[in-house]
């Protein structure tokens, strides 16, 4: 299975959340995005924290650990929702620039809901797909071990390249870096490249902030066991049962540093659903149309991993039982027809240029080439079939389309909406929108995994 090529729509600014209203109202107005930073609070299981979060300005003025004048003694330890700077999926690291494809987010977002801050385990805290069920649901008044550390290390390991960042508590990247994965050097070398990259990022953080990273989050392709931190299988990286979390813990020689491991598409979906195109919605389905097709099922700010880490593999929904064989061993799977790679192959065959890509096909569609229109229609029909099955199962409020094929924008999405609409009967149509974070989604999602893990650790003390 292959999930590469997740580059999706390009970079609209991510508008999120509400600023805390003043004067303090006695309720946290953050919509469930929390951090380990700040003063702890005491909560019983299922109890609701009815205190206000100080304003960001107040937080900046007041030294850590010192209550702001007039602030309640117990305050929400979670950061306000972030507003990452606009970014383009195609720009060099650290160079946020023009927006070219803003998501029509306003059309699908529900009215902002002011949620009370609640215990992380009591249902009000959007979590990642990590299994936190074993964590205590009681938040106790302890000082987080890494309370003063302002960043986590986030890394997205792709088939050809790795994207990394130091991510702040507001989920905005503070520093970004890339390097090749080094797949040609073999699976052991890839592991070493991952470990040394994280080590370098940690050293960068130490130089900049004088502190260890609060946590590390890594997204990898293939089958991932979140609970044990094991990369179970990756065809792209030729990995089998790589205990990445343990290996990294040894390499870092920083005992106790929380390390989260996540599946790349689910991790990207986590970011899209929480701080990207799906921000503000309670149920979403993220679909990445890249080298393959994969999905992420979002529920209340977290992504469902499934019982065995296989939830969301919609690329292997059978849409044409007599179709070509898929890499999974079955025939007629969705990704055989509707991945960016599949569309590129189909267009290459149709136009006679073996180097033609899905982007070329989209261009030819825009130009009205009848051969391209036939290729496009075939892919859209298959995609709509697969998505209707997914919609029937998941009933998402928002369907986020990302990956390389989604870079075609409305050339893809406009006919896709119609094709889905024509196929549903009783199902409610979700709002279909382009991904908003581009190829930064995996890295930003890895940062969310790390902060979530840290937050859960603090909550369990
Ligand atoms: Zn398949």
Image (cartoon, rainbow, N blue to C red):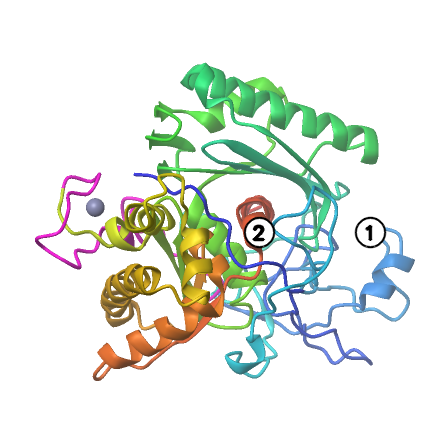
Answer with mark 1 or mark 2, whichever residue precedes in sequence.
Answer: 1
Q: Position of residue 56 (x, y in %)?
A: 81, 64
* Residue 182 in the figure: left or right of residue 373: right
Q: Which residue is mark 1?
A: 65
Task: From the viewer's side, name the closer residue of 353 and 432.
Answer: 353
Magenta stretch containing residue 395, yes or no?
A: no
Can residue 63 be seen here? The reply is yes
Rendered residue at 32%/65% (across/down): 370
Ligand 1 lies under 8 Å from the Cβ of mark 2? no
> Distance from label 1 to label 2 (Cα)?
17 Å
Location of residue 256 with respect to 82 vertically, above or below: above
Question: Which range is magenta?
Answer: 300-329
User: What percent of the width, then of the height, locates residue 171?
Assistant: 66, 53
Q: Position of residue 110 (x, y in %)?
A: 52, 81
Residue at x 62% of width, y 19% of height: 253
Q: Main secondary structure of the magenta part?
A: loop
List the residue tagged with mark 2: 459
Q: Please tell me in which quadrant of the rendered image residue 102 appears.
A: bottom right
Q: Sort mark 2 into few (<14), some (14-19) or many (20+) by Cα contacts within 10 Å.
A: many
Question: Which picture quadrant has residue 414?
Answer: bottom left
Please tell me whether residue 325 belongs to the stretch shown in magenta: yes
Disc 1 to disc 2: CB gap under 8 Å: no
Residue ID at (37%, 75%): 417
State left or right for residue 23 relative to residue 48: right
């Amino acid at each position: 299975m292959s999930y590469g090529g997740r580059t999706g729509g390009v970079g609209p600014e991510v508008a999120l959340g509400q600023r805390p209203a003043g004067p303090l109202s006695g309720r946290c107005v953050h919509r469930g995005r929390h951090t380990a930073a700040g003063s702890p609070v005491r909560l019983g299981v299922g109890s609701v924290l009815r205190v206000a979060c100080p304003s960001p300005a107040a937080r900046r003025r007041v030294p850590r650990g010192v209550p702001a004048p007039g602030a309640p003694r117990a305050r929400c330890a979670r950061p306000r929702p972030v507003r990452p700077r606009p970014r383009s999926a195609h720009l060099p690291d650290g160079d946020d620039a023009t927006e070219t494809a803003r998501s029509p987010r306003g059309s699908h977002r529900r009215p902002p809901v002011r949620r009370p801050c609640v215990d992380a385990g009591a249902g009000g805290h959007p979590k990642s797909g990590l299994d936190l069920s074993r964590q205590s649901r009681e938040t106790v008044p302890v000082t987080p071990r890494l309370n003063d550390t302002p960043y986590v290390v986030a890394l997205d390991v792709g088939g050809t390249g790795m994207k990394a960042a130091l991510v702040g508590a507001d989920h905005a990247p503070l520093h970004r870096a890339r390097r090749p994965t080094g797949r040609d050097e073999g699976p052991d070398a890839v592991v070493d490249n991952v470990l040394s990259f994280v080590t370098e990022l940690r050293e960068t953080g130490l130089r900049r902030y004088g502190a260890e990273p609060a946590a590390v989050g890594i997204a990898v392709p293939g089958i991932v066991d979140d609970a044990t931190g094991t990369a179970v299988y990756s065809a792209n990286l030729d990995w089998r049962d790589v205990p990445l979390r343990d290996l990294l813990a040894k390499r870092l020689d920083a005992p106790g540093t929380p390390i989260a491991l996540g599946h790349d598409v689910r991790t990207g979906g986590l970011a899209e659903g929480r701080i990207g195109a799906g921000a503000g919605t309670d149920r979403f389905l993220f679909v990445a149309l890249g080298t393959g097709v994969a999905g992420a099922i979002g529920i209340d700010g977290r992504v469902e991993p499934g019982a065995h880490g296989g939830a969301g593999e919609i690329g292997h929904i059978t849409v044409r039982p007599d179709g070509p064989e898929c890499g999974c061993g079955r025939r007629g799977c969705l990704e055989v027809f509707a991945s960016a790679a599949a569309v590129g192959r189909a267009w290459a065959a149709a136009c006679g240029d073996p180097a033609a890509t899905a982007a070329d096909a989209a261009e030819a569609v825009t130009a009205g080439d009848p051969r391209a229109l036939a290729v496009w229609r075939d892919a859209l029909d298959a995609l709509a079939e697969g998505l209707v099955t997914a919609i029937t199962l998941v009933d998402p409020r928002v369907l986020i389309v990302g990956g390389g094929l989604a870079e075609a924008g409305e050339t893809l999405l406009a006919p896709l909406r119609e094709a889905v609409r024509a196929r549903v009967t009783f199902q409610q149509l979700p709002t279909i929108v382009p991904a908003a974070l581009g190829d930064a989604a995996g890295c930003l999602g890895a940062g969310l995994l790390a902060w979530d893990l840290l937050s859960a650790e603090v909550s369990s003390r």
